Image (cartoon, rainbow, N blue to C red):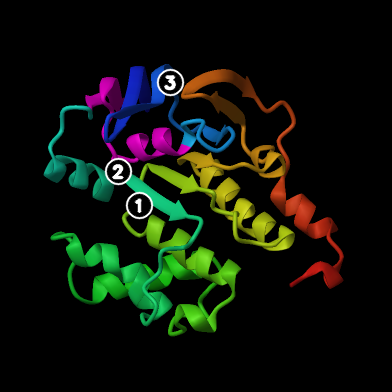
């Protein structure tokens, strides 16, 4: 699914060259659930942005489903993002005055193959999947953080992507709501989607199947998770009074 070979990224701040990634080589197979970890400035977010076609590498190769991405122009990268990739961000990135339904419909409005009532029907279906059938017409200020992140996940699913990237998807959430979001991601993984998340929380990383650790722009550890946490089991064990 994902192959990077000697991938490097250098940012130039005036006369100063900052090497965010240093010759990273690894593969992520189809259907994997991977956590990328590391301290601030380790290169993990830069790596995620390149994988998600939001940024370009300075050197090296990045192949997505066998297709070389590194040399693509902006239009080609946008096409890859719209067809193959779904994004979930820490800050939700929702439009303040749009309803949940309109938020989720938005990506399809730029898809020439999606037309008319089919767009709204599809948006309703994915919102129902994440448990928000009763919040279709609510705006972000009328929803909790967990509900907003569910909207963001539904929006990421609307184009039926093969890969979902999450940049600290539980970073702004309390413990129980974080488990609810991880339960959704685990379900999507069980359905066969490839999921890659950046997180600084060890507890969240243990919900995945593989942890890749970055330090100073390099991979320093790449290990399987031998006993992944099942978010649904953990939720069932939480006392009711812990619900925010």
**Location of residue 206 in the rendering, given as x and y in whole percent from the top left corner:** 69, 37
User: 101 or 119, which lies in front?
Assistant: 101
Image quadrant where one finds the N terminus: top left
Measure the alpha-carbon separation of dots 2 and 1. Answer: 19 Å
> Circle 1 sits on which residue?
160
Left or right: residue 34 versus residue 237 is left
Secondary structure of the residue carrying numbered label 2: loop
Relative to 202, is 91 above or below? below
Q: CA distance from mark 1 to mark 3?
A: 22 Å
Query: Crowdedness of circle 2 by 10 Å Cα count: few (<14), some, many (20+)?
Result: few
Helix, strand or loop at disc 1? loop
Mark 3, residue position: 27
Q: Residue at x 52, y 65 (%)?
A: 150
Label 1 neighbourhood size at 10 Å, few (<14), some (14-19), many (20+)?
Answer: some
Q: Earlier in the sequence, mark 2 or mark 1?
A: 2
Q: Is residue 66 magenta?
A: yes
Residue on which disc 2 sits = 54
Q: Which one is in front in this view, the residue at disc 2 or the one at disc 1?
A: 2
Give the quarter of the figure containing the C terminus. bottom right
Marks 2 and 1 close (CB-CB < 8 Å):
no
Q: CA distance from mark 2 to mark 3?
A: 19 Å
Q: In this picture, which residue range is highlighted in magenta?
A: 45-68
Tell me if residue 114 can be seen. Answer: no
Q: Quadrant of residue 77?
A: top left
Q: Kindly report which numbered mark, 1 or 3, lies closer to the viewer in this rendering.
A: 3
Q: Foreground mark, 2 or 3? A: 2
Q: Examine the rendering and report whether any part of residue 14 can be seen.
A: yes
The answer to which of 27 and 15 lies nearer the viewer is: 15
Sequence-wise, the earlier of marks 2 and 3 is: 3
């Amino acid at each position: 699914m994902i192959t990077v070979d000697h991938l490097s990224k250098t940012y130039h701040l005036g006369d100063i060259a900052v090497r965010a990634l240093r010759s990273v080589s690894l593969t992520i197979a189809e259907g994997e659930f991977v956590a990328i970890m590391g301290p601030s400035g380790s290169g993990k977010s830069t790596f995620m942005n390149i994988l998600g076609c939001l940024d370009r590498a300075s050197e090296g190769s990045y192949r997505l489903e066998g297709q070389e991405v590194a040399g693509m122009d902006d239009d080609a990268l946008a096409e890859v993002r719209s067809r193959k990739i779904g994004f979930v961000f820490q800050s939700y990135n929702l439009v303040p005055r749009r309803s949940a339904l309109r938020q989720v419909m938005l990506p399809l409005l730029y898809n020439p193959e999606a037309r008319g009532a089919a767009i709204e029907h599809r948006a309703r279906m994915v919102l129902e999947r994440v448990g928000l059938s009763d919040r279709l017409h609510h705006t972000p200020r009328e929803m909790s953080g967990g509900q907003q992140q569910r909207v963001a996940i539904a929006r990421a699913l609307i184009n039926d992507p093969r890969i979902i990237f999450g940049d600290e998807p539980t970073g702004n959430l309390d413990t129980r709501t974080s488990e609810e979001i991880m339960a959704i991601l685990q379900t999507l993984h069980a359905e066969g989607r490839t999921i890659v998340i950046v997180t600084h929380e060890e507890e969240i990383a243990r919900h995945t199947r593989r942890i890749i650790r970055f330090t100073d722009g390099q991979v320093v550890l790449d290990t399987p998770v031998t006993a992944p946490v099942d978010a649904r089991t953990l939720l069932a064990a939480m006392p009711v009074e812990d619900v925010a």
